[in-house]
Image (spheres, helix red, strand yellow):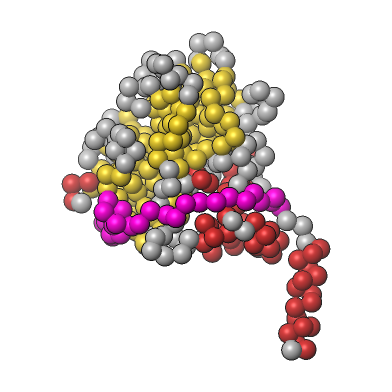
Amino acid sequence: MALAFLLLVPVLAALLILECPIDPSYMSFQEPPLMTGALEVNLKLRQAERLFEGELVGPESIVNIGDVLYTGTADGLILKIQDGKIHNLTRIGKPPCGTREDEPTCGRPLGIRVSPNGTLLVADAYYGLYEVNPDTGEVSLILSSETPIKGRKMGFVNDLTVTRDGRKIYFTDSSSKWQRRDFTLLVMEGKDDGRLLEYDTVTKEVKVLLDGLRFPNGVQLSPNEDYVLVAETTMARIRRCYTSGLTKGGADMFAENLPGFPDNIRPSSSGGYWIVMSAIRPNPGFSTIDFVAERPWIKKIVFKLLNQETVMKLVPKYSLVLELNEDGSYKRSFHDPHGMVVAHPSEAHEHDGHLYLGSFRSPFICKLNLKDI
């Protein structure tokens, strides 16, 4: 007992003295949905093929022009993948790159789309919205993250989607407080300072469509462009904001109490949507994130003692891809428990009968043949 006391006193003293980088909010979740029916656990993601392993890191978002793929990576590059080879197309930021400290100046291209005129639209977490020529790599600024929107600069530009006529770009600013390199702190703090924004390429005006979001992440316009979906990662749900009709400007819930924490949203060929998750809320099972959400004091202790990278290692790896119907209901799911083949997924991009799976940190792209599953 004496030995235990001698060991405990310094630990308690340290906990009192050490500062916590976050001020966590109290949050409460419903019981996660049962992994049955369309959510039944399977190993279908393990049928995926890893491409270019070790040749790129963190291919967050993927688009194609014909059979040529484009993606942005953790070292600030925008890559062009053609005929099985990787080419460095351009860079928005400037070297050096590769460390957490370098990221704000190196830049981090996240969401990427093809515009109606055939150029690439890129959301860089630190620099803002850009247009990139897919052939020459020429970069043009659309909207700087330094531009105040309703008195607040954009701290974490994340994903974007564009109308068919190219007039409107809808995009997310995940937080005014936390940068992308601190996304773990953003999730664990539960900060509600994220926004869904609309940029008019003609008038150059920016509107705030939704505010007070907890880590707004992926965005996707509906096929009729009458609403835009936004993944609210921290809350395990997807919001819907109406862009036209009698409900214009209104918002409701498209899919809530999801079995995991959604990242990017992309269209599926069935008329629905692909949603990707790298951390889940198992049921049956125990959800650590749900447990600590109602106990902010645990979060404070954890982040007084551990850094973000260590905390990331403690989160159980589980890769999940959901296909939602157009009404938000579950259509089917592909799983890789423990992330043995598909690890840390961020997006599912459908092209020519395959899913190309991006990642926010893995050194490869995964390719899944939908005909095989």
From what the image shows, is residue 155 above or below residue 186?
A: above
From what the image shows, is residue 9 above or below residue 257?
A: below
The residue closer to the viewer here, 139 or 345, is 345
Magenta stretch encompasses residue 55: no
| Residue 352 lies in quadrant | top left
Q: Identify the residue at horizontal 38%, vertical 53% (top origin).
A: 33
Magenta stretch encompasses residue 30: yes
The residue closer to the viewer here, 247 or 217, is 247
Q: Identify the residue at horizontal 75%, vertical 78% (top origin).
A: 8
Left or right placement of residue 278 versus residue 328 in this view: right
Q: x, y (%) of residue 248?
A: 45, 19
Left or right placement of residue 345 versus residue 140 in this view: left
**Number of numbered tags placed on the structure image:** 0
Left or right placement of residue 182 versus residue 163 in this view: right
Q: x, y (%) of residue 240?
A: 43, 31
Q: Identify the residue at horizontal 56%, vertical 37% (top origin).
A: 213
| Residue 328 lies in quadrant | top left
Query: Which quadrant is home to the N terminus?
Result: bottom right
The residue closer to the viewer here, 34 or 151, is 34
Q: x, y (%) of residue 166?
A: 42, 17
| Residue 3 lies in quadrant | bottom right
Q: Residue furthest left?
A: 371
Residue 128 visible (yes or no)? yes
Q: Which residues are magenta?
A: 21-48
Q: x, y (%) of residue 138?
A: 49, 24
Residue 113 visible (yes or no)? no
Q: Identify the residue at horizontal 55%, vertical 41% (top origin).
A: 215
Secondary structure mostly taken by the magenta-highlighted segment of the chain: loop
Q: Residue furthest top?
A: 203
From what the image shows, is residue 97 above or below residue 221?
A: below
From what the image shows, is residue 87 above or below residue 203?
A: below
